[in-house]
Amino acid sequence: MTDDPLDTIQKADPDMFGLIGQSGELAFTEEGIPLQYKFLIAMALDASEGAENGVRNLATQAINAGATKEEVMQAVRLANYISGIGSVYTAANALKDIV
């Protein structure tokens, strides 16, 4: 398993790391939009940004929260529609062993 990329931030600036954690906790509450869909939204955004590890981790979390593989692929379709084919290549690399 690879190291958390934020380990460097945690060591160098614990206060900032704490704010990042609080932001994540606020974003991924059980309120409003169901958690599985929040993960899918975040996954599509990461695909759009070229964040392959984020796509992989968020897709896994979405599936663990109840999303189907078909829903994962629907989120990839949305990323493609908004951000283009680059997001599909990112998702394809990230999802090799997931869908």
Image: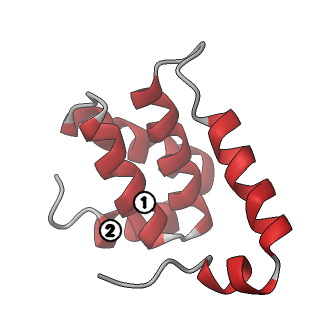
Q: Is residue 84 visible?
A: no
- Which image quarter is the N terminus in? bottom left
- Identity of the residue drawn at 35% across and 45% down: 61
- Identity of the residue drawn at 48% across and 50% down: 43
Disc 2 or 1, which lies upstream in sequence? Answer: 1
Asked if residue 84 lies left or right of residue 72, the reply is: right
Rendered view: 8 above or below 76: below
> How far separated are the C-alphas under marks 2 and 1?
6 Å
Residue 36 position, x and y percent, is 39, 30
Asked if residue 90 lies left or right of residue 83, the reply is: left
Amino acid type at image mark 2: Ala
Q: Quadrant of residue 53?
A: bottom left
Q: Please tell me which residue lies in front, 53 or 23.
A: 23
Residue 45 position, x and y percent, is 59, 51
Query: Which residue matches tag 2?
Result: 94
Looking at the rendered structure, the secondary structure element under dot 1 is helix
Q: Is residue 96 visible?
A: yes
Q: Please tell me which residue lies in front, 80 or 41.
A: 41
Amino acid type at image mark 1: Val
Asked if residue 74 lies left or right of residue 41, the reply is: left
Q: Quadrant of residue 6?
A: bottom right
Rendered view: 25 above or below 30: below
Query: Coloured how?
Result: secondary structure
Would you say the residues marked 2 and 1 are in contact, meaning their CB atoms lie under 8 Å apart? yes
Looking at the rendered structure, the secondary structure element under dot 2 is helix
